[in-house]
Amino acid sequence: MSVKYIPVQWNRNKWIYDAVMLTGVALFLWVFLYLTPEVLSHEQPVTAQIHNARAFGACAFVMLTVILCIGPAARLDRRFLPLLYNRRHFGVMTAFVALTHAGYILNWYFAFSSTDKLVGLLYANASLGQIAGFPFELFGIFALICLLILAATSHDFWLKFLTPPIWKRLHYLIYAAYFSVAAHVSLGILQDQKNHVFTVLFILGASAVIVLHIAAWLSERREIAAKDGAWAEVACVGDFREGYAKIAKLANGDRVAVYLMEGKLSAISNACAHQNGPLGEGKIIDCLVTCPWHGFQYDVRSGRSPAPFTEKVPTYRLRVIGDMVEVHPDANPPGTYVEPVPLPEPPPDPARDPAEQGATA
Amino acid sequence: MNVAEALVMVMQAWGIIGAVVAAVFLTIGIDRIDADARGAYIFRPLLIPGVLLIWPLVLWRWWQTETERAAWAERYRPVRASYGIAVVLMSLGIVAIVTLGLSVRQSWPADIAPLQLSEGARQ
């Protein structure tokens, strides 16, 4: 099975998302440059280049803060999921905004440097042994390199080529980049603030990122601790819908999609072999589940794509204990057939009206 | 040569090697290791910046894929376990650096008259 790569995958939602994002960026720059100079102490005569550099720098910080808030917010509340699905475009745009900030700095402060501008930037301040006056530019350069790596490896190809675990680890650079940006701001522009509006806004933004991430992490830990043990609970018998999956999160963090097909349960990895698309969000048609991202299909009993295609995903063993469906956390090698487990009738709910039960049976 | 010039030279060398790797990988390697890339050419220029930046990783993964050395389970191994470490380190680092930055911040009265500390050089 093969889906040819294209430069950018667009759809209507992505157009709307990108339009809102670009409008937001333009609005932020306009407000920063023209509406609030006195609030941000820019009523002092600074050159247009410095003013622009500050505007783009502040914009990059805000964008990075929003990006970092989207992930944990979506994990804590699924209503934020639509914001998560096109976050890559947001990240690429942030890298361009940060690059523009760096461009203004280099082309203003080092415009007449007798050496290369970059050499001038690295050479201008070598006070590495002190905190006040530390060359905060180094943090900015490191953050910019991280953002460029993340933006440059955001195409689908990289996820498949590097494999999701390596790609994900590489993209953990976002946390190092955000710390670096915080250091760049703290030891840089924050040292020069005569009013505290920017300081307060900066601390609020960074605090939002910290609080959301810690909350999401603790929430995940609680979930995983509750599921620790040899067999992991998936869902109650009555929760399954014919043709659809319930997604279970294992103690090791992996996700398993458990499908109900023709009254029997089968479990495969939730990660598509192509680019780790969420198989559990797909629907079963003719024994095959279709990945919602690129249409790759798998037999849920064996984890194999239909011939002549050769993609395979791991399968899992299931059992039903009382009213609870459980999955064993040890994955079978990709493509291993597992006999589907018949789903028993859910026990009648005494709290419900018998007439209603008959109507939904 | 000072440290700054050496760093910039290392960056330039990194970029030149990356350009050579990009040229070979995007014309020959990519077709050998990824069926989805065969016959798809328009997206390849988009990969150039990525190869320039992380070419050692590209070479390593290319070699791994060609020699089929990666175990099947690796692909499905989640990395969420590292999330907590990354988040805690980032949070502690931010709190520390912001506190440090604010503690060394200097303030001065902006509206007092300037005081001449020494005679200027006579013309």
Image (spheres, helix red, strand yellow):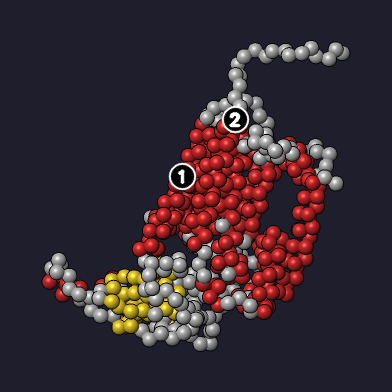
Tally the numbered discs.
2
Residue drawn 73% across the image and 75% down it: B28
* Chain letter, disc 1 residue: A
CA distance for labels 1 and 2: 23 Å
Visible in this render: residue A80?
no
* Chain letter, disc 2 residue: B
Q: In the image, is A36 to the left or to the right of B22?
A: left
Q: Where residue A16 is drawn, which disc sits there?
A: none
On the image, the x and y values in percent for residue A237 come to 27, 74
Q: In the image, is A129 to the left or to the right of A176?
A: right
Q: In the image, is A78 to the left or to the right of A201?
A: left
Badge 2 element: loop
In the image, is residue B118 above or below residue A152? above
On the image, the x and y values in percent for residue A74 come to 42, 56
Visible in this render: residue B74?
yes
Q: Badge 1: how crowded within 10 Å, few (<14), some, or many (20+)?
A: some
Residue drawn 34% across the image and 70% down it: A233
Q: Which residue is mark 2?
A: B105
On the image, the x and y values in percent for residue A68 come to 51, 51
Residue type indicated by callout 1 = Ala
Q: Which residue is mark 1?
A: A208
Quadrant where the C terminus of chain B sits is: top right
Q: Quadrant of residue A136?
A: top right
